[in-house]
Image: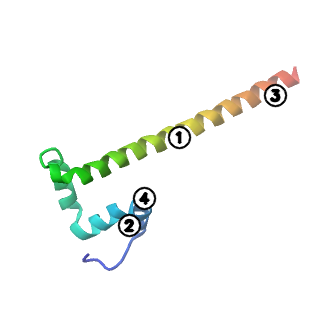
Amino acid sequence: MANKYISASEINQYMYCPYQWYYEKKYGHKYINELRDKIDTKPELSNFKKGMEYHEKYYKDIIFIRYKKIAIWIFVILALILIGIGFFK
Protein backbone atom coordinates (compact mmCIF):
# COMPACT_ATOMS: atom_id res chain seq x y z
CA MET A 1 0.00 0.00 0.00
CA ALA A 2 2.36 2.61 -1.26
CA ASN A 3 -0.11 5.43 -1.85
CA LYS A 4 -1.63 6.88 1.33
CA TYR A 5 -4.31 8.87 -0.53
CA ILE A 6 -7.59 7.38 -1.74
CA SER A 7 -9.20 8.62 -4.95
CA ALA A 8 -12.91 8.82 -5.73
CA SER A 9 -12.65 5.85 -8.06
CA GLU A 10 -11.10 3.81 -5.24
CA ILE A 11 -14.01 4.71 -2.98
CA ASN A 12 -16.38 3.54 -5.70
CA GLN A 13 -14.39 0.31 -6.04
CA TYR A 14 -14.51 -0.18 -2.26
CA MET A 15 -18.27 0.32 -2.20
CA TYR A 16 -18.63 -2.26 -4.97
CA CYS A 17 -16.39 -4.86 -3.32
CA PRO A 18 -14.14 -4.16 -0.31
CA TYR A 19 -12.10 -7.31 -0.95
CA GLN A 20 -11.39 -6.32 -4.51
CA TRP A 21 -10.24 -2.88 -3.38
CA TYR A 22 -8.02 -4.32 -0.65
CA TYR A 23 -6.29 -6.86 -2.88
CA GLU A 24 -5.82 -4.27 -5.60
CA LYS A 25 -4.17 -1.91 -3.08
CA LYS A 26 -2.06 -4.62 -1.45
CA TYR A 27 -0.84 -6.60 -4.47
CA GLY A 28 -1.35 -4.25 -7.41
CA HIS A 29 -3.18 -4.52 -10.70
CA LYS A 30 -0.41 -6.46 -12.45
CA TYR A 31 -0.42 -9.27 -9.88
CA ILE A 32 -4.23 -9.54 -9.99
CA ASN A 33 -4.13 -9.86 -13.77
CA GLU A 34 -1.51 -12.62 -13.46
CA LEU A 35 -3.87 -14.47 -11.10
CA ARG A 36 -6.66 -14.21 -13.65
CA ASP A 37 -4.41 -15.93 -16.18
CA LYS A 38 -3.58 -18.76 -13.75
CA ILE A 39 -7.12 -19.58 -12.54
CA ASP A 40 -7.54 -22.78 -14.56
CA THR A 41 -4.08 -24.19 -13.87
CA LYS A 42 -3.93 -23.82 -10.08
CA PRO A 43 -6.66 -25.33 -7.85
CA GLU A 44 -5.64 -23.19 -4.85
CA LEU A 45 -7.07 -20.15 -6.63
CA SER A 46 -10.65 -21.48 -6.35
CA ASN A 47 -11.71 -18.60 -4.06
CA PHE A 48 -10.47 -16.13 -6.64
CA LYS A 49 -12.48 -18.00 -9.28
CA LYS A 50 -15.59 -17.92 -7.06
CA GLY A 51 -15.17 -14.17 -6.67
CA MET A 52 -14.86 -13.68 -10.43
CA GLU A 53 -18.03 -15.75 -11.01
CA TYR A 54 -19.89 -13.76 -8.35
CA HIS A 55 -18.98 -10.45 -9.94
CA GLU A 56 -19.91 -11.65 -13.44
CA LYS A 57 -23.33 -12.74 -12.15
CA TYR A 58 -23.73 -9.42 -10.33
CA TYR A 59 -23.06 -7.45 -13.52
CA LYS A 60 -25.52 -9.58 -15.50
CA ASP A 61 -28.21 -9.08 -12.84
CA ILE A 62 -27.66 -5.32 -12.70
CA ILE A 63 -27.82 -4.98 -16.49
CA PHE A 64 -31.00 -7.10 -16.62
CA ILE A 65 -32.70 -4.99 -13.94
CA ARG A 66 -31.65 -1.77 -15.68
CA TYR A 67 -33.08 -2.89 -19.04
CA LYS A 68 -36.23 -4.14 -17.35
CA LYS A 69 -36.80 -0.72 -15.75
CA ILE A 70 -36.22 1.02 -19.09
CA ALA A 71 -38.68 -1.34 -20.81
CA ILE A 72 -41.34 -0.66 -18.16
CA TRP A 73 -40.91 3.11 -18.53
CA ILE A 74 -41.19 2.88 -22.31
CA PHE A 75 -44.35 0.80 -21.94
CA VAL A 76 -45.88 3.31 -19.49
CA ILE A 77 -45.08 6.26 -21.74
CA LEU A 78 -46.52 4.52 -24.80
CA ALA A 79 -49.65 3.57 -22.85
CA LEU A 80 -50.09 7.18 -21.73
CA ILE A 81 -49.65 8.42 -25.30
CA LEU A 82 -52.22 5.93 -26.59
CA ILE A 83 -54.65 6.88 -23.80
CA GLY A 84 -54.09 10.55 -24.63
CA ILE A 85 -54.76 9.96 -28.34
CA GLY A 86 -57.91 7.97 -27.54
CA PHE A 87 -59.09 10.61 -25.10
CA PHE A 88 -58.92 13.45 -27.65
CA LYS A 89 -60.91 11.61 -30.37
Name the residue type under label 2: Glu
Q: Are marks 2 and 4 in contact (CB under 8 Å)?
A: no
> Is disc 1 placed on a helix, strand or loop?
helix
Q: Nearer the viewer, mark 2 or mark 4?
A: 4
Q: Is residue 45 left or right of residue 13?
A: left
Which of 37/48 is in front? 48
- Residue 32: x and y, percent? 22, 58
Query: Which residue is found at the position 42% from the left and 40% from the top?
Result: 60
> Circle 2 sits on which residue?
10
Which of 15/54 is in front? 54
For residue 16, the mark is 4
Other residues around mark 2 within 10 Å, as few (<14) / some (14–19) / many (≥20): some
- Residue 78: x and y, percent? 70, 28
Q: First in sequence, mark 1 or 4: give its number.
A: 4
Name the residue type under label 1: Ile
Q: First in sequence, mark 2 or 3: give its number.
A: 2
> Circle 1 sits on which residue?
65
Name the residue type under label 4: Tyr
> Circle 3 sits on which residue?
84
Other residues around mark 1 within 10 Å, as few (<14) / some (14–19) / many (≥20): few
Q: Quadrant of residue 56?
A: top left
Which of 29/38 is in front? 38
Q: Nearer the viewer, mark 1 or mark 2?
A: 1
